[in-house]
Image: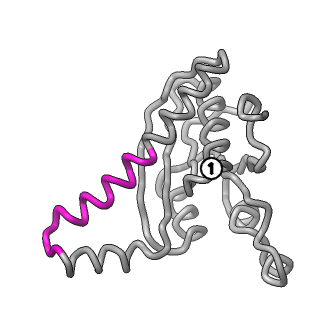
């Protein structure tokens, strides 16, 4: 039987990311004691933090920005728990850790997987990068599937069971 102790959920706050949160919560519900790591990678975070430091040079400004993103991650999980309950599938929020990072999405995901001994990644896909780039390198999620040392559960834009119309 497949046992999961830690699930990584990369979140960009899109509908498909919410579907991935839903799927992760359902997997965690079936694996008591499981922990979920919610990760938001904002490529321009370093630039944004630098701008905030220049306009308000206080350490709390940076922390406030990161805490706001972390609160958004927790809010996204709470929203999916509410949706599940409304659909008749009450789920319990497992231990949730949140990370907010700047940098390259794939590199950050791989580092979090390695640092935290993640067993499963539940990631949404928007359907590919498109154009010539999409043909050559694929989507970020597709590249993660190929490079991750753990299993990757890919959630398509159609969503997860109770999110379907």
Percent position of residue 140, x then y? 69, 67
Residue at position x 36%, y 75% from top? 48
Q: Residue furthest left?
A: 58
Magenta span has 27?
Answer: no
137 and 13: which is toward the camera: 13
Q: Residue furthest bottom?
A: 132
Left or right of 30, for residue 11: left
Left or right of 84, for residue 151: right
Residue at position x 59%, y 32% from top? 25
Q: How many marks on residues?
A: 1
Residue at position x 86%, y 78% from top? 135
Percent position of residue 81, x then y? 54, 28
Where, quadrant-wise, is the C terminus in this rendering? top right
Give, as a single range, the part of the protein colored magenta: 56-73
Left or right of 112, for residue 164: right
Name the dominant secondary structure of the magenta segment.
Answer: helix
Tell me which corner region of the image, top left, top right, bottom left or bottom right, holds residue 158.
Answer: top right
Q: Residue furthest front?
A: 165
107 relative to 20, above or below: below
- Secondary structure beneath dot 1 equals helix
Magenta span has 63?
Answer: yes
Per the image, the residue denoted by label 1 is 17
């Amino acid at each position: 039987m497949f046992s999961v102790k830690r699930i990584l959920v990369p979140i960009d706050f899109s509908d498909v990311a919410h579907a991935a949160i839903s799927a992760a919560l359902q997997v965690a519900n079936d694996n008591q004691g499981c922990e979920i790591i919610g990760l938001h990678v904002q490529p321009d975070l370093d630039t944004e933090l630098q701008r905030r430091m220049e306009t308000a040079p206080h350490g709390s400004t940076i922390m406030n920005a990161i805490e706001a993103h972390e609160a958004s991650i927790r809010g996204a999980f709470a929203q999916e728990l509410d949706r599940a309950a409304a659909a008749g599938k009450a789920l319990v929020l497992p231990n949730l850790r949140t990370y907010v990072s700047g940098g390259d999405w794939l590199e950050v995901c791989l580092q979090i997987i390695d640092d935290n001994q993640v067993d499963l990644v539940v990631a949404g896909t928007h359907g590919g990068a498109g154009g010539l780039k999409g043909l050559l390198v694929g989507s970020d999620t597709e590249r993660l599937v190929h490079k991750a040392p753990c299993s990757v559960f890919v959630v398509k834009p159609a969503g997860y069971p109770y999110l379907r119309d």
